Image (cartoon, helix red, strand yellow):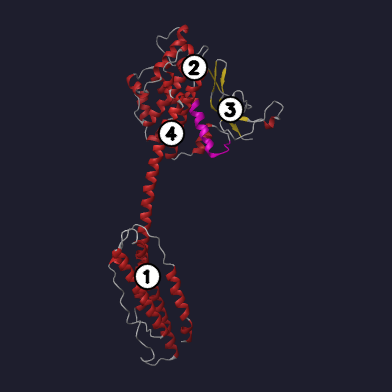
Amino acid sequence: MDTVKSKSSNVTGLVHKFSKVLRFRATGISPDDSIRNPKLPEKDEDLTHKVFKNSQSFNGDDEKVINREAMEALIAKLFANVSAIKAAYAQLQIAQTPYDPDTIQSADEVVVSELKNLSELKQCYLKKQIIPSQNSQMVAEIEEQQNLLKTFDILSKKLQSQLELKDSELIFLREKFFESDRQNKTLEKRLNPNNCLSAFDNLHLSALNPNHFITVLRHTLKSIRAFVKLMISGMESAGWDIDSASGSIEPDVKFTKPAHRFFAFESYVCRKMFGDFQNPYFSIPKENSSKQRHHQRQFFESFMGFKSIKPTEFLLQNPKSLFGNFCRLKYLSLVHPKMESSFFGDLNQRTLLNSGEFPASSFFAEFVEMAKRVWLLHCLGFSFEPEALIFQVRKGCRFSEVYMESVVEDGFFFPSGDSSPEIFKPKVGFTVIPGFKVGKTIVQCTVYISPA
């Protein structure tokens, strides 16, 4: 029994430690009905007001067994009381926001009642007035588990409330982002009117100069990059291996950053869309073609008349036009059947194109917008005398600042002069965007430099 006495202070300290960890932040959660209308715990008569010494005589071994059972019952009851306090105190804190006076009062009563029970347990322990019944320990353990479940339920409601709040904040921020993006685009159009082809409304053939071509080229590249992003997004959604796909486009090229794989797809789209750019109307047969002396003005009039149309509506009204044939041929060349099947689950778009019709999907609409801008750039290029020339550089060529620019602005150091050792002269990995020669003006091609 001396051993039991020596543990008195430890049990008291344990009670204080449990009371210190009962802290919860207040959140807006509906109160627990079991806390709102508490059922105050009944006193366990098996654990109080019974004295061993007056019941019967025990030998030493029986006394040790009873003491051990008494301690186990006491600890079980102690944890049950502490768990009840924890659940009630959690509800007490939560009920403050929004303020619920009834729940606060009922939870406070439970806390006070359980603290009194703890005090009584302490007194029974000190006075050795605990005789365990057959099921007292099991009942206490069940009460502890019930209180823990109640606490976890309160915590789950708290987390659910926080999750709903974060979802609301996310929706608000997403809407704010889209609104800001729309405003930025509006401001960009106002600040940079050259980005809009409406600035060419009063353009005359005699006033045409290379700056007009450069403006339309930038307009075209913006659409190409938008389509490339859409294409990569479709690949990721379909579960494509982007590394393998970019590697199949540009084999043996090491990308310094994973994001640089985008340039391989951009290079692929540019090669397909600008193929046969140097030939009138991309070598598409044209009935009743004009003589060579009318060539320049004819292309300029095509540019002026076509720049303000909506391409999807034009295709519906003119499915057999030169532009319609251009879109059909370029789509079938650019979008591989495997790609289309993985994006849409079928080959219906190819079937429609082969039958002389055009799909109504958003993917094809984005493609047609890109095709329109390439077509306009082609018409404007052939409006010059002589017509604009397109060029690109081979893989492994030395980098030239006259004809090339690096797609990665801060990726490499380019030493100037021919006296630099060959090992320090950067090499072209592949051409991303072709270059153009408009009269005496060189529009540099954009290249990706291979890492040494």
Query: How many numbered tags mark residues here?
Result: 4
For disc 2, the marked residue is 381
Find the magenta span and give its range: 254-270
For disc 1, the marked residue is 85
Q: Amino acid at mark 2?
A: Gly
Badge 2: residue crowd in 10 Å (few <14, some 14–19, many ≥20): many
Seen from the viewer's position, the closer of residues 288 and 70 is 70
In the rendered structure, which disc, 1 or 4, sits on the residue that comes first in sequence? Answer: 1
Badge 3: residue crowd in 10 Å (few <14, some 14–19, many ≥20): many
Badge 1: residue crowd in 10 Å (few <14, some 14–19, many ≥20): many
Q: Amino acid at mark 4?
A: Asn
The residue shown at (41%, 28%) is 367
Q: Is residue 369 above or below residue 290?
A: below
In the rendered structure, which disc, 4 or 2, sits on the residue that comes first in sequence? Answer: 4
Element marked by disc 4: helix
Is 146 on the left or on the right of 59, as rendered? Answer: left
For disc 3, the marked residue is 405
> In front of the other: label 1 or label 2?
1
Image quadrant assignment for residue 236: top left
Q: How far apart, in angstroms, are the residues tagged by discs 1 and 3?
A: 71 Å
**Residue 68 visible at all:** yes
> In front of the other: label 4 or label 2?
4
The residue shown at (38%, 68%) is 86
Q: Is residue 419 above or below residue 380?
A: below
For disc 4, the marked residue is 184
Looking at the picture, how far across and down is residue 85, in whole percent? 37, 70
Q: How far apart, in angstroms, are the residues tagged by discs 1 and 4?
A: 56 Å
Seen from the viewer's position, the closer of residues 24 and 409 is 24
In the rendered structure, which disc, 3 or 4, sits on the residue that comes first in sequence? Answer: 4
Q: Amino acid at mark 1?
A: Ile
Image quadrant assignment for residue 200: top left
Image quadrant assignment for residue 27: bottom left
